[in-house]
Image (cartoon, helix red, strand yellow):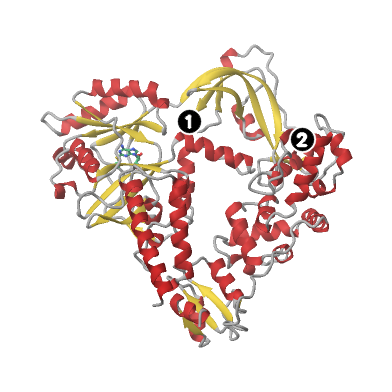
Amino acid sequence: MTQGEKKVKERIDYLRKVIEKHDYNYYVLASPKISDQEYDQLYKELEKLEQEYPQFLSKDSPTQKVGAKVLREFKRVEHSQPMLSLDNTYNEEDIYAFSERIKKNIDQPFHYCVELKIDGVSFAARYLNGKLDRGISRGNGVIGEDITEHLRQTKGLPKELSQEIDIEVRGEVYMPEDVFAHVNKVREENGLEIFANPRNATAGTFRQLNTIEVRKRGIGSFTYSVVEPEKYGIKSQTQMLERLQALGFTIENHYKSLESIDDVIDYWLTWTEKRHELNFDIDGLVVKVDELDLQKELGSTAHSPRWAIAFKFPAEQKETTLESLTWSVGRTGVITPVAHLTPVILAGTTVKNANLHNIDNIREKDIKIKDKVIIEKAGEIIPQVVRVIKEKRTGSEKAIEPPEECPVCGGEVGKAKSDEVAIRCLNPVCPAKVKRALQTFSSREAMNIEGLGEKLIDQLVEREMVEDIADIYYISEEQLISLERMGQKSAKNLMGEIEKSKQKELHHLLAGLGIPNVGKKTAKEIANAFRSLDKIVNANMDDLTVIEGIGEEMARGIVRFFSNERIKTIIKKLKEADVGRSEEKEELTGTNLKGLKFVITGELQSLTRSEIKKKIESQGGKTTSAVSRKTDYLLCGKNPGSKLDKAKQLNVKIINEQEFFNLLNR
Ligand code: IVH
């Protein structure tokens, strides 16, 4: 080892130690001592050094352990014991019946342990020697998916316990209300569909292969049970919660041990009122027989335990009047009926509008304008009209008819597919569509054109100065000045911003085009893989599916998008305006891999695929997607796919990451 390398190794060791300490503070003690930014800086420095000096890479490095990994797929894992669900009740009568059933089966005094029912997503976590070994999602209750890496990024779930024991616990992960509001705001700004509720948002986050999202979104956890508690001398549910807390888990602290079912009902009534005071969603209480020996005696059915029940809150409902209705046109042209209501307070917020979904729903519920209606918020942020109070009709109510033309442009309407319920505006240049498309295009994640906000976009479209996103590059300063509230100076500034956006990297442009299902991350992967707009436009299914994170369905959407004639015109106009220019090839820094063709398969430990690709190109090599006789090397990571078999068949040389780096640096 040279003197220089020794220094690097020392720095790496030092960084690993500090990062581990901060991880402990963050994940175990839930009490970080440095800001996220400071932490990121340390982490990035370590990552960089490890990339530059792969010889020092180690499986024990925090970059390999805690680093949010991008998984290739979800592995299936069998549960040690089935994850059952709970029977539900919504009223006092049923909860009395539950209590009677228990009393009939056990003839000794007992307690109820009453907990809040977290409206999240359940998980199981196994610890070996006090270390988090595996996380499993509920799945079908018998077999779940491996979510170990997701749980490592979850708050309140320790990676190391205060005792070196083997134990399996179960609980719920959730997205806090404030994070949820923020996530949806950002999604809306970027033209993405918003999550209906925090539970969906949590599930969506856990379904992503990129586990950094779990940490970024501040997913939290509450743990409420231990599998095989008798092994640890635990005698009651209350003791179980205390024990979990002592081990380092976050438990939901509003649990109570109660003696009578009347007290349980009182506690339920209290929380029916107070549920919105928390920073996470609850949808009821869980009532459990506290004593574990009695739980055992009562046993379970195949579906749920007999010793517990979910005592759910009623969905919150209010009566109001449907004053009027408008049809709103989305970016894809779908026309949705929106009901405008006499404002009422429901579940803590003032409600003015309700989504009526589509004409079939309106007909089914026989909803008319001026009807008195019952609206409900059942876990969704947008309230629904549950039913019409027909007894209160006066005869002056007016039927709702589907629009015969687009409410925005007057264009033809119809169904995109015959089995679709939604009606769409079929005019490709409908101002409503163009406005939404422009909002996406100029948003921060995309071309980030400062000053091109909603109001201005409205004017540009309404005055027919732009008919598609590309037109923005053909506007003149004079045209801008002619708009309301637009002085000479702001017009000049905006022209400058528009011009500046031409320099934006390719992935920003891709994120702004509104390709179905392509968000910021996928846009980056695609841009990295092709580095030229032309290549992306002409990519076929095979070219696309080799990219990380792109499945068949998404690839099909992308190909279909670029084969649309209107999109072709837009792309042509963008290119003529010098937007979306090709990105420079990786600079040639050597010739170690000159003329060699590589194929990559499996999960790589040190670098991402695109980074490896860059390394190969920087030394004069090439990567291709499929193994053929012309392939020189198959770079094989963990859990390789069928490419490995193909390579063996064709006698292609197979190398691991270390061997690859040897070649690269030879
Ligand atoms: S105990 C045998 N306790 O509710 C199942 N579950 O509707 C015992 N849940 O699958 C579950 N908070 O995901 C229990 N304090 C709590 C809970 C809770 C939320 C979820 C859990 C379960 C679902 C049943």
The residue depicted at 81 percent of the width and 32 percent of the height is 486
- Disc 2, SS: helix
The x, y position of residue 34, in whole percent, is: 40, 45
Three-letter residue code for mark 1: Ala
For label 1, the residue is: 378
- Quadrant of res 303: top left
For label 2, the residue is: 456
Three-letter residue code for mark 2: Leu
The residue depicted at 74 percent of the width and 41 percent of the height is 433
Quadrant occupied by the N terminus: bottom left
Residue furthest left in the image: 108
Instruction: Report whether residue 332 is seen.
Output: no
User: Is 404 located above or below residue 141 in the figure?
Assistant: above
Q: In the picture provided, is 518 more to the left or to the right than 426?
A: left
| Between 496 and 362, the one nearer to me in the picture | 496
- Quadrant of res 307: top left
**Earlier residue among tags 1 and 2:** 1
Residue furthest top in the image: 394
- Disc 1, SS: loop
